[in-house]
Image (cartoon, rainbow, N blue to C red):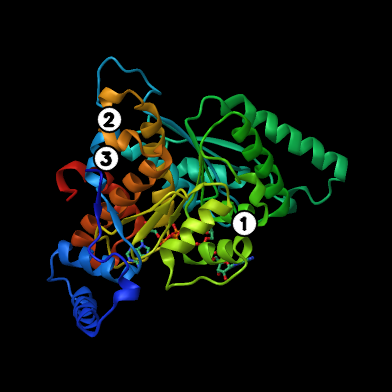
Amino acid sequence: MFVKHGMNSGFSSLASSAVLRRQQFLIRSLKGYSVSDKIRMEAVKCLSGGASLEANAESVLRAITPSLDPTRHKGQAGKIAVIGGCREYTGAPYFAAISALKIGADLSHVFCTEGAATVIKSYSPELIVHPILEESYNISGVNDEGKRDISKKILSEFDKWMERFDCLVVGPGLGRDPFLLECVSKIMTRARQSNVPIVVDGDGLFLVTNSIELVSGYRLAVLTPNVNEYKRLVQKVLRCDVNDQNTHGELLSLSKQIGNVTILRKGKSDLISDGEKVQSVSIYGSPRRCGGQGDILSGSVAVFLSWARQCNSAAERESTISRTNPTVLGCIAGSALLRKAAALAFEHKKRSTLTTDIIEHLGQRYTHLS
Ligand SMILES: NC(=O)C1=CN([C@@H]2O[C@H](COP(=O)(O)OP(=O)(O)OC[C@H]3O[C@@H](n4cnc5c(N)ncnc54)[C@H](O)[C@@H]3O)[C@@H](O)[C@H]2O)[C@@H](O)CC1
Ligand SMILES: Nc1ncnc2c1ncn2[C@@H]1O[C@H](COP(=O)(O)OP(=O)(O)OP(=O)(O)O)[C@@H](O)[C@H]1O
Ligand SMILES: [Mg+2]
């Protein structure tokens, strides 16, 4: 079976004092590190409220990961592009792009501003960096016609590459400059016309929340909101505040309202929905909440969803998995892998664990994923 029924379907409505006592015990257990991962997972499921379908992440990972076959050529394991990197942020696009390579993609590109490009290139010679984006401050003396020309040039530079990509990650460290975001909207529209999947994260979600039509109804779009980003999406799309008593129902409605795009709501448990059902990944990760873990996740989801789309022959896939939306499979695999890598990094580095430490553990998934 691909999914296992959670232990507490309809928990919120059935809560009795005995269940509440058990919950309180589990909350106390979570504070220490002596209890097993399994108990922590139970606790998280108990606390999530609503029917819980914990994804069998290990099966998903095994089913969608391509073999290291000597007949395969460079590029077949994935070509990913991250659109992000501006004056403020260079770490986020680097984390997303390098994570894609560490997981097993063959090529990882970054499209960013010129200033950010030099920095990102210096972090890693493995990344292919395109310094094509422009921010308003850099073109402040240019008139409207000049700006239109710059925008056209950016789009045509991107067009040269786009057909080669298996997935785009839009947003890590993108910033919120209006001119830059306008150009990125055009890039997203072009990618959508060419059926290239798009993972939207960070400032990409800021853009999409204000221009929901960019992804609305696009089944190859994945949104990966953190707590703030989710709140803004719910307020904009559902026109209400986040309701923690109805997490699953709310996520289903949000996804449906945006035309069944896949949403991965990050948090204590990661919740994933494409508007059909909600699945969770509650594997215990790390108590460190250092910045950059969401960036690892977006790069990882991009690779896994590309792999999930590739294995469309029934022989290659387990039956339930073959019927599951590849974007959902990508989210389950990405979330599980990040969480396990975070747990392994925390075992070694404890409170000093940083995003770069987690990236170093991305490759250990098969031996340690439980
Ligand atoms: N090392 C790095 O380069 C990192 C960069 N990051 C990037 O940082 C950017 C922001 O991500 P966060 O997760 O911090 O975003 P959040 O939305 O969680 O919050 C960011 C900040 O923006 C403010 N803010 C919220 N709504 C706003 C609005 N409507 N207009 C202007 N400001 C608003 C918040 O008060 C907060 O201080 C993203 O591009 C993200 O990818 C992060 O990924 C962390 C690591
Ligand atoms: N309270 C939590 N307990 C356990 N894991 C969590 C918790 N909150 C987030 N995570 C995990 O950390 C990962 C990143 O989520 P987070 O909310 O930090 O994203 P983010 O804010 O976008 O990160 P970034 O700093 O990269 O922008 C997610 O996969 C999620 O599973
Ligand atoms: Mg983020």
Which residue does the numbered mark 1 point to in the structure image? 209
Q: Amino acid at mark 2?
A: Arg
Residue at 50% across, 29% down: 165
Give SS at disc 1.
helix
Q: Name the residue located 34 percent from the left edge and 51 percent from the top edge.
A: 335
| Frontmost residue, 235 versus 165 | 235
Measure the alpha-carbon separation of dots 2 and 1.
Answer: 35 Å
Dot 3: element: helix
Say left or right for 198 vs 31. right
Residue 21 x/y as whole percent: 20, 83
Report x, y in % for residue 223. Answer: 50, 50
Q: Identity of the amino acid at label 1?
A: Thr
Q: Amino acid at mark 3?
A: Leu
Front residue of this view, candidates 113 and 36: 36
Residue at numbered disc 2 = 317
Label at residue 61: 3
The secondary element bearing badge 2 is classed as: loop
Which mark's residue is nearer the viewer, 3 or 2?
A: 2
